[in-house]
Image: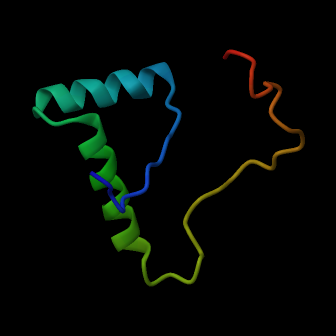
């Protein structure tokens, strides 16, 4: 069955993943549901801001050291 939903993929550290998995298990929710809810809440909170998010990014000076085919 076709869907019009888009998929997003994220990377988490081991500790972030462990904490998310524990939260999901404790509340009998899927990690995907928690992630989706977090994104919806973030979008709602920042919807009216003109692309000025409260985020600080480190300047990236070189491309990823891993190639597409190299395992991580």
Residue placed most toward the observer, 21 or 45? 21
Q: Quadrant of residue 6?
A: bottom left
Farthest residue toward the front? 1
Tell me how the rendering is colored: rainbow
Q: Which residue is drawn at the image coordinates 66% and 17% (left, top)?
A: 72
Residue at horizontal 22%, vertical 31%? 23
Using the image as rendered, state which of residue 68 and residue 62 is in the foreground: 68
**Quadrant location of residue 69?**
top right
**Picture coordinates of residue 28, whole percent (x, y):** 10, 32
Q: Which residue lies at the image location 16% right of the left edge and 26% below the top edge?
A: 25
Residue 57 sits above or below residue 14 on the image: below
Examine the rendered structure and indicate whether residue 35 appears above or below residue 19.
below
18 relative position to 27: left or right: right
User: x%, y% of residue 14?
Assistant: 47, 19
In the rendered view, tell whether residue 35 sits above or below residue 50. above
Question: In the displayed image of the protein, which residue is found farthest to the right?
Answer: 62
Please state if 4 lies on the left or on the right of 29 as rendered.
right
- Residue 62: horizontal and vertical position, in percent? 89, 39
Is 25 on the left or on the right of 50, as rendered? left
At a point 53% along the width and 33% down the height, the residue shown is: 11
Q: How many numbered marks appear?
A: 0
Q: Is 12 situated above or below 34?
A: above
Residue 18: quadrant of the picture: top left
Give the camera-side residue of 32 and 21: 32
Q: Is residue 28 left or right of residue 47?
A: left
């Amino acid at each position: 069955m076709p869907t019009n939903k888009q998929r997003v993929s994220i990377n988490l550290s081991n500790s972030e993943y462990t904490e998310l998995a524990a939260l999901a298990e404790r509340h009998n929710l899927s990690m995907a549901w928690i992630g989706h809810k977090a994104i919806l809440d973030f979008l709602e909170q920042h919807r009216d801001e003109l692309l000025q998010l409260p985020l600080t990014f480190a300047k990236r000076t070189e491309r990823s050291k891993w190639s597409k085919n190299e395992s991580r």
